[in-house]
Amino acid sequence: MDIKYVKDSYGKLGIDVDAAVKKVGDIPISIHCWQGDDVIGFDGSGSLGDGLATTGNYPGRARNFEELKEDIKFAFSLIPGKKRLNLHACYAVLGADKGKVDRDKYTYKYFEPWVKFAKELGLDGIDFNPTFFSHKMMKNGLSLSSPDEKVRKFWVEHGKACLKITEYIATEMGTPSLMNIWVPDGMKDVPADRLTPRLRLKESLDEILATPYDKKKVVVSVESKVFAVGIESYTVGSNEFYQNYAAKSGVCCLLDNGHYHPLEYVSDKIPALLAFYDKVALHVTRGVRWDSDHVVLLEDELKEIAKEIVRNDATDKVMIGLDYFDASINRIAAWVVGARNMRKALLYALLQPNARMKELQDNAEFTELMWLNEEVKTLPFGEAWAMYLESEKAVGAEWLEQVKKYESKILGERK
Ligand code: RNT
Ligand code: ZN
């Protein structure tokens, strides 16, 4: 590779390739454990429900803790840069307590094996999610907004338990953890009452957050959604509901880019929230026509999302997490493609003449701004990415060969 040519090409437009290559690996990306087993987990109904769905039956799904760990370890070895593990409560390692203890009573000990594993892998930290789905206590598709007080309380207790677990995990890992709350609560058909379920959700969230926790260690976020299959007409935790809840309650918002109307862009929402919040959490995904959670590809909106993080100096404020699940292709390849693409998009954003472009905007020099924006697009980005991989001693495009070997050796055995 002609490194001088790469540096000169970027240099002509005032872009420092070395600085970008040096920085990009330090931005943590929280990688979801649930790509490995189609969001089934170890403790629930054994199938996915509540508006969530995976499609495909590619062989090799991880069926237990050991297999999931093995797959994560391998997938992560092919993903360069600083990584965190994003866990869901349904991945509790219950051991002999399986069937005896339910989600409302979970404690740190069921996640200690994950912490041990994350430390072994040298991960930056662990993020956590209470699991309000795929469980017998989901009644009529409702959890925290249920009119059944027993149901609502069960899930409040689950939320409280998770808050303590998250705090413990953060202490153990030595970096703050995100605890993200998403509930599938909603209705298939026209509701008679849109307000009361929201008031109950608000009350439940207040009860969960009344648990004392160290705000330096745990960042709580709330994730809105517009609709899901089977929950088309009404979502209790809508965007307006959660943005107002977050603003009033001192928590932050999580933006999942599959959770808005197709012509709304999360890239534009990031700076809107940065004007008010210290933290903004993301679930980066790819919706094809709907919230389909396809594998993240290096597309324009992904690049725009990365630009908003980088050019607003918000790499410490925006907590990047991935959230997609594809069961129609090799699941490890799905993990690797999406996570490498997130990192690629960050490098792409670091390789923009950001300061100069802002200046052009302020000076209303829109002709030059358009020219610059377009010229940057055809710079030798592939080579800059290769320079980054080289700096991390990371594998290039040949990573797929390793996945194929792993597939025939390990995944093929899972019948
Ligand atoms: C669902 C939400 C939620 C889940 C995960 C598994 O639409 O995006 O974040 O995907 O919690
Ligand atoms: Zn999500």
Image (tube, rainbow, N blue to C red):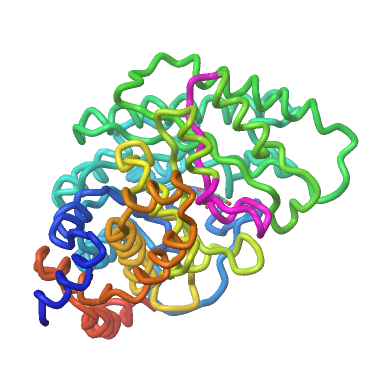
Left or right: residue 340 versus residue 101 is left
Residue at the image position 33 percent from the left and 38 percent from the top: 110
Tally of numbered tags:
0
Left or right: residue 119 versus residue 203 is left
Which corner quadrant holds the N terminus?
bottom left
Left or right: residue 79 versus residue 371 is left
Q: Is residue 39 visible?
A: no
| Residue in front for this viewpoint, 248 or 83 | 248
Which corner quadrant holds the C terminus?
bottom left
Q: What segment carries the magenta color?
A: 249-268
| Residue in front for this viewpoint, 103 or 156 | 156
| Residue in front for this viewpoint, 107 or 178 | 178
76 is within the stretch colored magenta: no
Residue at the image position 34 percent from the left and 76 percent from the top: 378
| Residue in front for this viewpoint, 253 or 61 | 253
Residue at the image position 56 percent from the left and 66 percent from the top: 54
Using the rendered view, name the quadrant where residue 94 is placed.
top left
Q: Is residue 259 above or below residue 164?
A: below
Residue at the image position 34 percent from the left and 43 percent from the top: 96
Q: Is residue 250 above or below residue 303?
A: above
Left or right: residue 318 versus residue 112 is right
Percent of width and height locating residue 42: 43, 52
